[in-house]
Amino acid sequence: MHDLIRDMGREIVRAECAMEPGKRSRLWHHEDVTRVLRDESLPKKLKFLCLDHSRNLTRLPDFSKLPHLENLSLIGCKSVSGGYHFFAQLKMLQYLRLADCNITDDAILESLRSLSSLRILGLDGNGFNRLPILSGLSQLTSLYLNHCTNLQAIPDLPTSLRRLEANYCTELEIMPGLPEMSKMIALRLKDCRKLKDIPNLDNFLCKMHTLHMQGCATLTATFKENILLKWKGDVIGGLSLCVNDIPRRLPYVAREDETVKIEVPATFDYIGGLVVCIIYSSDNSECTGSLRIHVVNRTQRTRFHIWPMETTVTASHECYLWLGNLTNKKLNLKGGDKVRVHADFNESDEDTDEEEDYQTAPYESDEEEDYQTAPYESDEEASDDDKELSDYSSDEVQPYKRFEVI
């Protein structure tokens, strides 16, 4: 938002009740906030409270005067050491962010179990060793545990949970088996190097669209094999693992910078999508940034650009696999279509895949805008596309791709 537009909006809100800040819909100036809270004039109606990086805050307040609070953010409040039992008063709380709060006390975490309306919980960057059982939080949909480097075990999770992020939890060894009624669609566990497997996960892959486990170097061979065999997730996030071999079931192979040419069999009555598999090396400096897939349908004269993920390099001398299904609901492939597919990496300044935008807005939809329709002009890649595709050994460490129409 431009500063002038922001200031104009603030002035409109201020003018609503210039002399009575407690009646305004929003407060941002610290003097107004202090006056309202001290006089108890925006608390029973208060829904959003952000106290991020309040370095001098040592104790949480009595929340009984904020019965309608829905969103509480305490990110970076490292000095808070008391008052966590007041969480039990927040019966309407849906979003709670406690990232980087120096939380190590189990009693603090136990107090979260009373938040029956909680939907999103952010505990990134804290020092606790294990979580309490959170299965009683029947409304919880998103849990964030990134960079909890002392976390060793995650116990039973609520069946309502749709996404779990525990990236860079380097001591994590134990994950719970997903319950029968699990709604999990996104699981990110990058660089959890002591994790060997996730019980029962392969039975839920048909529902998931994102599974990122790059850097999980001790996963068992059986676990990885089952995942690769059963993965059917759409391209929204895709599957990412540390492996060297592309699944043999994918027939079309291309080296780095080559384009795959596919002619969809005319006999196909139903096409579910286009499976794309890419392996890239952590030692290749060109394999950084945003993975981008280009799909050109020369028959229908359509072109798509697809951004499924940001690459992650967690250690040297590793090879990472990304496997995704480009859904035909958007590509609209038909029997007889002549298709060209190419993948590359775009450098980016930050890893946008690493952080869900839960700090500013709740995640409400299972769909993410990762397909972009581009105008079809001339087929500029034609000269490069005419290269003959060749098979080569699967232990190649340069980026290479394999494709399949399903």
Image: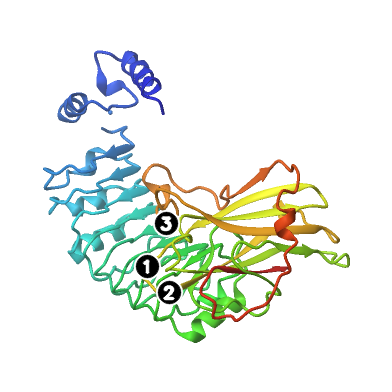
Proximity of marks 1 and 3: CB atoms separated by less than 8 Å: no
Q: Is residue 367 visible?
A: yes
Residue at 29 percent across and 57 percent down: it is 123
Distance of mark 1 from mark 3, alpha carbons?
A: 24 Å
Picture coordinates of residue 329 (x, y %)? 72, 54
Contact, mark 1 vs mark 2 (Cβ under 8 Å): yes
Position of residue 164 in the picture relative to residue 108 (left or right) = right
Give the image location of residue 274, x and y in percent: 70, 63
Q: Which mark is residue 314?
A: 1
**Image height check: is 25 above or below 176?**
above
Residue of label 3: 142
First in sequence, mark 3 or 2: give its number.
3
Which mark is in front, 3 or 2?
A: 2
* Residue 128 percent across, percent down from the top left: 22, 66
**Quadrant of the rendering where the C terminus is positioned:** bottom right
Which residue is drawn at the image coordinates 57% and 57% (left, top)?
Answer: 344
Which amino acid type is marked by label 1? Thr
